[in-house]
Image: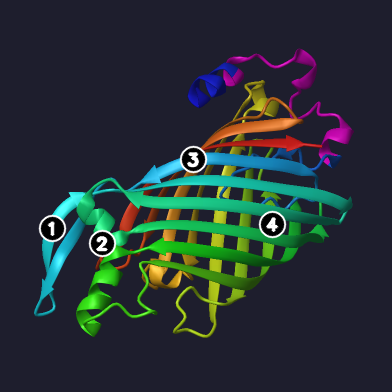
Amino acid sequence: MCAILLLLVLSTPPAPSQVSSADTLPAVFTELPGVLGGHEFVTSSEVKDPFIRTFLHTGLGFGMTPELVIPLVTINDTSIVGLKGSLLYAVLDVEYQQMIRNWLAVHGRVQVIGRMADKTPALISQGVTLLSAFDLGWLFRVHKSDRFLLSGSLGIRNSSATDVYLQRFIEGIIENGEIKPENRLVQTTPTLRGEVGLHGAYAISDLTGLTFGAELDYGESADRNVSGEWSYGLTAAVDFNLFHINGIPLGFVIGARTRSNSLGQITDQGTSQTFFGRIGYTGSREFSLGLDLGYELTPIRGLEKKQGFISVLVATRLYF
């Protein structure tokens, strides 16, 4: 249904009054949020919006590993390869940002991610995980020129990880010879972290724009053996908006992100890399609708190599 709705919206011709060439754009257009140097930026769920404006964002999607080989047992430090399976996950993402001044906005975000497996060996090896997070923060303008915008952000992130991990539970019984109170099948670990970041946009041309971001956070880890840890993220993306060039209400985003993990026992420590893209409708200034596609390489507990996840997210954004 989501794909059909997206196709219908994209096939709707824009109103003639909205189409203008780069040389005939009204002066007020360049003053609108999301516009620099005659280029209207295409939003993406993977890149934080650096513009000070009011919006409501929703995203609903799913992902999976194309192929996951599960080691069943380890003998003399050698893993014996077991059956193949897949990890599956679902994502719900809701964010609201309110502009307070033309240089300041406050935002709140709720994310829920559920992860499970499709076969018994993968289910035993990786368990079932539910991640929930709430972000509250501020976005403020640092610098703005005709083609360049730089914003800063401050915030806190309160998250909780509920992990149903059968393999850890069984190994604890074998090691201790009994079920001890600290060896629980279901573990819930809350974490609180503080975040700072820089987010920017640069209009390369009327057709093309560049967005980027850098974030640094510190706080509790899901691994209670670690008192506190730093985590970082770097993101860059290029977008192409065809609407104000030839009237086609289509926009594209291509980008990449790298991030250090802070999920403790849920994943192995290391960095994850994500390559993402977006196909979106850009024919309206009141809303945007798009299909976000991603491929992520991330370390998974108990496995030597990083695993690839493919994801699909249907995202909408309403501007007020």
Image marks 2 and 1: residues in contact by CB distance under 8 Å: yes
Residue shown at 52% from the left, 85% from the top = 227
Label at residue 125 = 2
Task: State which quarter of the image contains the C terminus.
Answer: top right
Camera-nearest label, 3 or 2:
2
38 to 112, vertically: above or below: above
* Type of the residue with mark 4: Gly
97 vs 115, left or right, is right
Residue of label 4: 200
Which residue is more in the foreground, 76 or 271? 76
The residues tagged by marks 2 and 1 sit, at their Cα atoms, a distance apart of 10 Å
* Type of the residue with mark 1: Gly
**Helix, strand or loop under label 1:** strand
**Helix, strand or loop under label 4:** strand
Camera-nearest label, 2 or 1:
2
Other-residue count near label 2 (Cα within 10 Å), few / some / many at <14 / 14–19 / ≥20: some
* Type of the residue with mark 3: Gly
38 to 116, vertically: above or below: above
Q: Position of residue 180 (x, y in %)?
A: 33, 80
* Type of the residue with mark 2: Ser
Other-residue count near label 4 (Cα within 10 Å), few / some / many at <14 / 14–19 / ≥20: many
Residue of label 3: 61
Residue shown at 24% from the left, 76% from the top = 173
Residue of label 1: 82
Q: Is residue 68 visible?
A: no
154 vs 167, left or right, is right
For marks 1 and 3 on the same chain, the one whose residue lies earlier in the sequence: 3
The residues tagged by marks 3 and 2 sit, at their Cα atoms, a distance apart of 24 Å
Q: Write down the region rendered in magenta.
A: 9-30
Q: Is residue 76 visible?
A: yes
For marks 3 and 2 on the same chain, the one whose residue lies earlier in the sequence: 3
